[in-house]
Amino acid sequence: MTNPLILTRDQTLHDELQRLAAAAGVAPEATTDPAVALRAWSTASVVLVGADVADELAALQPARRVGVHLVTWGRLPDEAFRTAVALGTEGVVELPRCDSWVLEVLADSSERFDVDGVTIGVAGGSGGAGATTFACALALTAAREGPVCLIDTDPLGPGADQVLGMERIDGIRWDALQQTSGRLGARALRDALPHKGELGVLTFGGGGPSGVETLQPFAARAAVAAATKGHRLVVLDLPRTGGDLTEELMARCQALVVLTRATLPGLASAAHFVDVAARSGPLSLVVRGSGVDAAEAQRIVGAPVLTSMPDQRGLDEAIDLGQGPVKSRRGVLARAARDVLRVLAPEAAARPAA
């Protein structure tokens, strides 16, 4: 990923974009020649095309790519929208009215990773499987290797911040996020979340929904998109209640991990859940407890088993004391989390202590 690219002959527009780039801490490449712009077209982190040269650029038929925005100083002419469509831009922007929006775009461009962030969904296939606890353990373990975002999407769950002992840490929660409008930038989200080291957590707070009975789809989409741009790993703690939003969130995951108890009723319940969830993409199991081996669990549920784990002694007490589910890198949950990460997100698999 290289620097942002600015293409315009409008001196006022050029100067304003350079000012915003400086404020965002990035050093863009700038040119007035569409042909020259094509040399950096595919590698630029983001492309800002002035409306004054957009028609010339469109005539050169550049390859379609993400991160292209049509920008103008003042009101955008109506005919420019046709050019924007021809270029495949993500949007059109009028300056100075939308300068804060451009600032966020440029700031985000400096934070994109060389590889796209991986999104892993964690869901409970049976009651009492401990999906939220495992999602927290997975995120905590991965955060030892770099920025991770844990997004709690279950208003009726225990609250990820309660499980992690982060309920008193300041930061934005869903109730505040669902009252905002406009673009949510990766940097803005990362800076606003409650943090424990490299782990940022978006949850409902207070051990419950804090007056928010449902998760609004617009807020969930914006948060997942922003988190993916700003973190190497995003872990979604998914509800078991189903519905259109849950299915959409599952579809946004590169992998889905289903927690189940190692009992015949638990595995039967997980099998029903997997029948529905498998339509959203690849999934695998984490089996908690003993009594049924991995091969039998896979046969009953119809999904591969990533790892099995016994119950972790002292887990409830550790959570009640605000210590979180991963007290030791050698603990049951930490080992199981590394097993999952080694398969689904190898770059985020933290090594155990020597």
Image: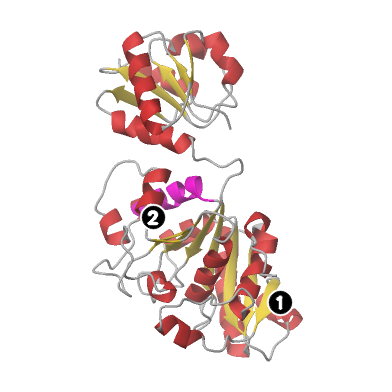
Q: In the current view of this chain or complex, which residue is farthest to the right?
A: 295
Give the image location of residue 78, x and y in percent. Answer: 30, 17
Magenta span main SS? helix
Q: Foreground residue, 236 or 301?
A: 236
Total marks drawn? 2
- The amino acid on which the numbered mark 2 sits, given as a three-letter code, is Ala
SS at circle 2 = helix
Residue 303 located within the stretch drawn in magenta: no
Q: Residues within 10 Å of mark 2 (few under 14, many from 20)?
A: many
Give the image location of residue 122, x and y in percent. Answer: 53, 67
Residue 216: quadrant of the picture: bottom left
Answer left or right for 275 relative to 295: left
Whole-Å distance between the Cαs marked 1 and 2?
Answer: 32 Å
Q: In the current view of this chain or complex, which residue is farthest to the bottom?
A: 291
Q: Residues within 10 Å of mark 1 (few under 14, many from 20)?
A: some
Residue depth check, mark 1 versus mark 2: number of the one nearer the observer: 2
Residue labelled with disc 1: 298
Can see residue 61?
Answer: no
SS at circle 1 = helix
Q: Foreground residue, 353 or 203?
A: 353
Q: On screen, 43 above or below 268?
A: above
Give the image location of residue 259, x and y in percent. Answer: 57, 76
Can see residue 154?
Answer: yes
- The amino acid on which the numbered mark 1 sits, given as a three-letter code, is Gln
Q: Which residues are magenta?
A: 219-231
Q: Residue at x 45, y 47 (%)?
A: 225
Give the image location of residue 54, x and y in percent. Answer: 44, 13
Q: On screen, 32 above or below 278?
A: above
Residue 225 located within the stretch drawn in magenta: yes
Label located before the other in sequence (1 or 2): 2
Residue labelled with disc 2: 220
The quadrant in which the N terminus is found is top right
